[in-house]
Image: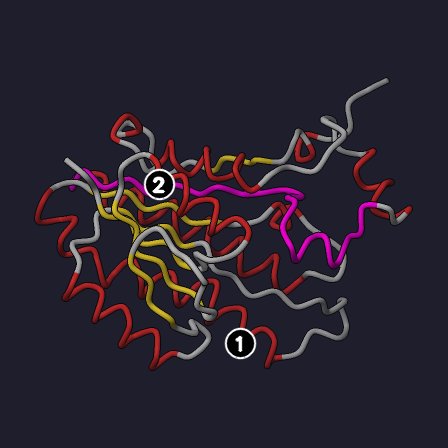
Amino acid sequence: MARTALVTGATRGIGAAIARNLAASGAEVVGIARHEPAQFDGTFFKCDLHDTAQRTRTFATIADRHGIDIVINNVGAARIEPTGSITKDALDEMWSVNVEATVEAIQAFLPRMKQQSWGRIVNIASGAILGKPGRGGYSATKAALVGLSRTMAIDLASFGITVNVVSPGQIRTELFLVNNPLDDPRTRANLAGIPSKRVGEPEEVASAVAFFASETSSYVTGQLLYVCGGLTVGKMPN
């Protein structure tokens, strides 16, 4: 039976790769993003998830029109603010998008999952949860997402619903390349600290997400998987 998957932030970078992977595996994909793509393999809803009222309406519309079996919360908000300069406005924005929108998306589609005793929820965090300079607010909200996911996994396991987290490291997305040009000495130094000695590809993150979203992952829940080329286990000894 074909499953229907919702992917937020579905038109760029990691989200686009996730949407393509799920569609290729036979899922019907419903995508949400602020920017409408020229082409999308599935059903697309334009929505700015920073806007609370807009996202509430969009989730309700999708729940009414589509039977969502899989929820991939990929969209995120990040601000660079060093400790001592973290602002409430930035914290509020990141909390709203990274945590509140995730909760709202899950709860909008939870009734169907419970009714059919099957569901897959995959939340996208970040390697920044382990600490990253200037990313205190971002790290905090993504770490909150991990705690939320683990608790939801406990609450929903008896309904046949799994909740897992994928935490990407340095991935070759448009945004990453803008902020980290590959010919920049600082970028090269960062890559040298990754055991695999390279940036990851969005498709590699999508493969991890696809496993958690699959039928075969039914006994895997409450888990955090880093897709980071070994970065999170430290630099390998010479």
Check disc 1 and give the amino acid type: Asp
Query: Does 77 appear above or below 15?
Result: below
The label shown at residue 92 is 1
- Residue 178: where, in percent of width, then height? 73, 58
In front of the other: label 2 or label 1?
2
Magenta region, residue range: 158-182
Tell which of 233 and 216 is nearer to you: 216
User: What's the amino acid at mark 2?
Assistant: Leu
**Residue 198 locus on image (x, y percent):** 73, 33
**Residue that numbered label 2 is attached to:** 22
Residue 73, magenta (yes or no): no
Q: Is residue 208 above or below residue 55?
A: above
Residue 172 sits inside the magenta stretch: yes
In the drawing, does residue 112 fall left or right of residue 139?
A: left
- Residue lying at 40% horizontally and 67% vertically, measured from the top left: 100
- Sooner in the amino-acid sequence: mark 2 or mark 1: 2
Q: CA distance from mark 2 to mark 1?
A: 32 Å
Q: Nearer the viewer, residue 87 or 10?
A: 10
Along the horizontal axis of the image, is 85 left or right of 116? Answer: right
Percent coordinates x, y for residue 180 in the rendering: 77, 53
Q: Is residue 49 left or right of residue 141?
A: left
Dot 1 surroundings within 10 Å: few (below 14), some, or many (20 or more)?
few
